[in-house]
Structures are given as C-alpha cells and as structure tokens.
Amino acid sequence: MIGKRVIVLFALLSYSPPPYLITSILAQSSEGTLESQIAHYIQIGQFDRALQDARLGVSRYPLSSQMYQLLGISLFKKELNDEARAAFRRAIELDSSNRLNFYNLALVDLSLNEYSEAAASLETLLRDNPRDAPAHVLLGRVYHNLNRPLAGIQEFRTALSIWPNLPLAHYHLGYGLLSLGYLKEALEEFRKEIDLNADFYGAYWLAGNIELDRDNVDVAEPLLRRSAELKPEAFEPHYGLGRVLVSRRQWPEAEAEFKRALAANPGSARCHYALARLYQQMGRKEDAEREFRVVADLHARIQHQLSGIADRRE
C-alpha cells in the first residue's frame, strides 16, 4: 500500500501538464478569487469597490454568468438599475439554469415599476421550475402591483403549499388579503409570519394596525412597540403608537410618537393631521393651526401633481 502511494506521488510530481492546461487552471483560480472578493465587498457594504472589481471581472471573463451576476448586484446596490438589468439579462443569456438571475432581474424591474417585464421573467422561470416557491412569492408581489390581487394571493398560496415555512410568504399573503378587506384572514397570516419570522418588523405593525382598528388597544400596543424596536426609523409603528397613546389620553407621549413618525416621513398628511387634532385636544391652538396649514399645503401639492400642470419653478 505504501509503495502504491509513493508511485502515485512520484507520478504527480513528474507530470508536466501542457502550457494551455496550466493557463486554464490559473485562470479558473484567478476568476474564482475575484468572484469571492467581489462577493465579500458586497457583503460588507463596500459597493464602490465591488462595482470596480465587477467591471474588471466581466472585461476579463466576458463569458462568465457568475461575474455578470455580481456586476448586476453591485450596480443594483448603487441604484444604477438600467445597467443592473442589462447585466442580469446577460447573465441569463450565458446560463439560463441559474434561477437567482431571474429573481434579481425581476427585483430590478420591480424597483423600476416595470411590472409586466418582471412578470414575464418570473413566468418564464416558473414554466420550467413550477415548484420554485420563492419565485411564486415574487410573482405574487408583481401581480399585486399590476392590480391583480386575486392572482397575487393565488401565487402566495401556491408558494406556501410547496414551502409552508417560507419566510415572508405569510406576510405577503396577509398583505394581499388586507388589500381586499379580509381583515380576520390577514391578521391570521401576519401572526403566522411573526411565529416563523420573529425579527421582521412589518408583520407586527400590520397586525397592530388591525387590532387598533378593532379597538383592541392593549393587544395592538405590544405589537407596535415590537415593530418600533426592530426598526426604530420606520414610520408605521410610531404612527400607530401615537394613535394608541391618543386613545389613552397620554398627550405628550403621543406627540413624541407622531414626531418620530414624521422624522421618518415628513410628507405624511395623515400624521400631520393627527398631530393637529392632538394639539387641539391639548389646547395648543397655534400649533394646531400650523399643522392644519401643513396638511392643506400637502393636499394642494398632491392635487397639483395629479393635475399635470407644471410649475415654472420646477
């Protein structure tokens, strides 16, 4: 046995591969190293460096689907969405078996409000991969944006029939049901998402809003507080908490929550209106009038935008 190992070792040491094979081995190693480097820069948030190396990568390895995928991700992180879409399309041309490229292309199209294009990519993917649960969820989101809520709900249900614990599937199904007014069913889905995905803030505030609209203030408050803990800079949980505190006549605390909400979304007319009403209840007439003026101005701007009339100053 020892003698055989020695013979094998000697054969490896004495073997001299042809020059073209050495070049191929070195190229593969170099390509893999560069891919790992780009992926690392993306992971740690150094998107400028990732993009720089990804551009270098596709120039060196123009037939690498993986390199174009990394380029697309880098471009998307830099909000260069048109270029990102072109990169993902090229990645698909080079390797149509990599489903991640279809997801990425659909996400770029979603960000550009190109919903029909996103639907086409996902429908193509699902024709060959009908049990791809994440693709069904993403297609459901696209259908929702195309004002096809029933089709979206069906996609979410299909995804859950394939993968019952798929993260965010219950959340999106709940959102779709909520948009059609099925509050009880939506609440059930949000609670399922919370059980499966306890660190996602969105299901908490949506469940909290439903409970608040039902006047279940004591149930709503911990849901909204948990949402605010998970994402302190988000508008929705702070606005909801402001409503909770108003119902309890805790005026200063409610004011603080509404102001936190407005720090996240200064253009929220409903939050400015809630603050104006709060100031009325607190007897702060001038503050209330100021907030009502803000609301009127925001509504005027919205009407102006909807009218299609261009302002000379714009």
Image (cartoon, helix red, strand yellow):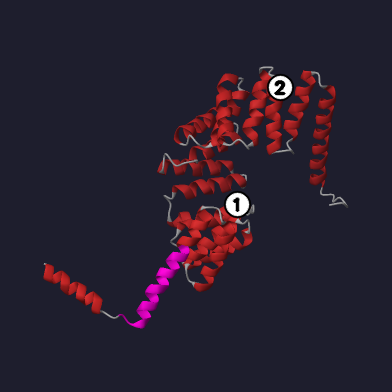
**Magenta-span inclusion, residue 13:** no
Which percent across, then down, holds residue 24? 39, 75
Give the residue drawn at x 82%, y 46%: 307
Which percent across, then down, holds residue 35? 47, 63
The answer, for residue 169, to whether it is visible in the render is yes
Query: Is the magenta region chiefly helix, strand or loop?
Result: helix
Is 87 on the left-hand or right-hand side of 18?
right
Instruction: State the residue position of label 2.
Output: 252
Vertical order, 279 against 51 (above or below): above
Q: Callout 1, which amino acid?
A: Leu
Secondary structure state at the residue bearing disc 2: helix
Is 276 on the left-hand or right-hand side of 211?
right
Vertical order, 194 against 220 (above or below): below
Q: Which mark is residue 110?
A: 1
Secondary structure state at the residue bearing disc 1: helix
Outermost residue on the right side: it is: 312
Give the residue drawn at x 21%, y 76%: 11
The residue segment tinted magenta is 17-35
How crowded pointer 1 is (Cα within 10 Å; few <14, some 14-19, many 20+) is rated as some
Which percent across, then down, holds residue 224? 58, 28
Give the residue drawn at x 75%, y 27%: 275
Is 18 on the left-hand or right-hand side of 45?
left
Q: Which mark is residue 261?
A: none
Which of 124/15 is in front? 15
Q: Callout 2, which amino acid?
A: Pro
**Magenta-span inclusion, residue 26:** yes
